């Protein structure tokens, strides 16, 4: 190689270095670099590509104080097989604050997930209510929001039609409402309601949802959404049965299957197994009382993503590893009853 060739190569490397510095360190756009160095934009783009190929670009992202959360997300995703886990920092002794923080994270996850034309199916509950409260899109989405269950009026977080309407309004979409109670008076009345044309149409739309946003509920904790829904005369059923949690208002066993409970027989709602075809089912939960319900939902393969606070995530990870001693394997089949 001649001296002239060496000088040309050095000049090229120097130019590449200058372009990389302006782009990656000083944050200049390619068009701005082109104007500053009197180059074409295509030339700048080519120099950046050359720099990458020569190994001159090394990107390092330091998560700083949130590194422990990132590590926890990776570990929990690996252990459970979930496609996405988001863990938020916990503030001990402040459940309301933790709920809002998880709600904000889940709202951001929803905004990153949805596309125009999507159907979003939702449950009621405090976690979903926190998502609706915290969602703040930068643009309008042409989406349809639909309930997965009947509703209970009286509290803002149990009225799923109210939540669906609010979410649709904030997203700039539309809501299709389910005018039915969550619990029918009897199994026979429930069966009749499920055959009503308007109710069947709404639930059929929910079955075709691209995204499902679901709370994962505890059942025996006073103040939990599900506990509040059940009449006083029937709360003993929650303690004496084999259910470990609640999903789509169904009592579910620790393996994620639907429990054989009189309460389930009166539900106007989709069966959890009917979400199996939904491309993205985002489960949301906050608090130590949700560890067992989360594990039940994971065992049944009922969710594809999980948004959870740090304390709860740590307990789920520890209890799963202690029980199995190996990566968690979720069931892929559930019976629709």
Image: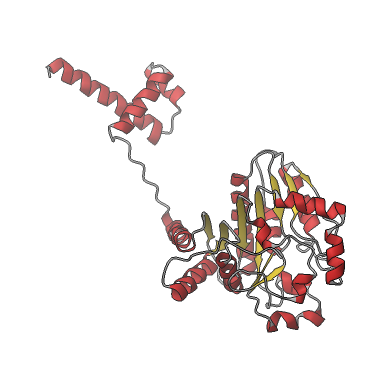
Q: Residue at x 53, y 62 (%)?
A: 89
Q: State the residue in front, 90 or 121.
A: 121
200 lies left or right of 207: right
Q: Is residue 288 visible?
A: no
Q: Position of residue 73 (x, y in %)?
A: 47, 59
Q: Position of residue 312 (x, y in %)?
A: 54, 69
Q: Quadrant of the C terminus?
A: bottom right
Q: Is residue 59 visible?
A: yes
Q: Residue at x 63, y 52 (%)?
A: 277
Q: Position of residue 165 (x, y in %)?
A: 79, 50
163 lies left or right of 305: right
Q: Residue at x 24, y 21 (%)?
A: 11
Q: Quadrant of the N terminus?
A: top left
Q: Residue furthest left?
A: 2
Q: State the residue in front, 104 or 292.
A: 292
Residue 300, compared with residue 40, is above or below; it is below
Q: Position of residue 135 (x, y in %)?
A: 67, 50
215 lies left or right of 73: right
Residue 297, compared with residue 137, is above or below; it is below
Q: State the residue in front, 221 or 95.
A: 221
Kindly indicate the quadrant of the structure image that contains residue 78.
Answer: bottom left
Q: Residue at x 52, y 65 (%)?
A: 310
Residue 219, compared with residue 274, is above or below; it is below
Kindly indicate the quadrant of the structure image that contains residue 181.
Answer: bottom right
The count of marks equals: 0
Kindly indicate the quadrant of the structure image that contains residue 29.
Answer: top left
Q: Which colouring convention does the figure follow?
A: secondary structure
């Amino acid at each position: 190689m001649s001296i002239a060739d060496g000088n040309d190569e050095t000049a090229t490397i120097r130019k590449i270095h200058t372009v990389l510095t302006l782009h990656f360190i000083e944050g200049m756009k390619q068009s701005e670099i082109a104007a500053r160095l009197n180059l074409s934009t295509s030339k700048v783009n080519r120099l950046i590509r050359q720099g990458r190929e020569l190994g001159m670009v090394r990107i390092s992202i330091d998560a700083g104080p949130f590194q422990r959360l990132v590590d926890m997300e990776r570990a929990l995703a690996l252990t459970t097989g979930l496609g996405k886990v988001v863990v938020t920092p916990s503030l001990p002794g402040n459940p309301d604050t933790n709920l809002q923080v998880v709600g904000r994270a889940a709202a951001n996850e929803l905004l990153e997930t949805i596309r125009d034309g999507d159907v979003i199916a939702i449950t009621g509950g405090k976690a979903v209510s926190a998502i609706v409260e915290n969602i703040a899109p930068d643009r309008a989405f042409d989406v349809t929001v639909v309930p997965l269950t009947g509703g209970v009026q009286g509290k803002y977080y149990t009225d799923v039609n109210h939540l669906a309407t609010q979410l649709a309004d904030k997203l700039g979409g539309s809501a299709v409402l389910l005018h039915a109670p969550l619990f029918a008076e009897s199994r026979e009345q429930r069966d009749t309601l499920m055959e009503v044309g308007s109710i069947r149409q709404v639930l059929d739309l929910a079955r075709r949802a691209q995204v499902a946003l679901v709370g994962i509920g505890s059942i025996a904790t006073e103040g939990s959404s599900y506990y509040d829904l059940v009449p006083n005369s029937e709360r003993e059923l929650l303690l004496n049965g084999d259910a470990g949690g609640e999903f789509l208002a169904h009592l579910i066993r620790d393996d994620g299957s639907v429990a054989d409970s009189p309460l389930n027989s009166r539900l106007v709602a989709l069966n959890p197994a009917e979400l199996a075809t939904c491309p993205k089912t985002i489960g949301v939960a906050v608090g130590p009382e949700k560890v067992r319900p989360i594990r039940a939902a994971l065992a049944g393969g009922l969710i594809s993503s999980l948004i959870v606070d740090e304390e709860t995530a740590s307990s789920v990870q520890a209890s799963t590893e202690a029980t199995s001693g190996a990566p968690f394997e979720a069931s892929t089949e559930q019976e629709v009853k």
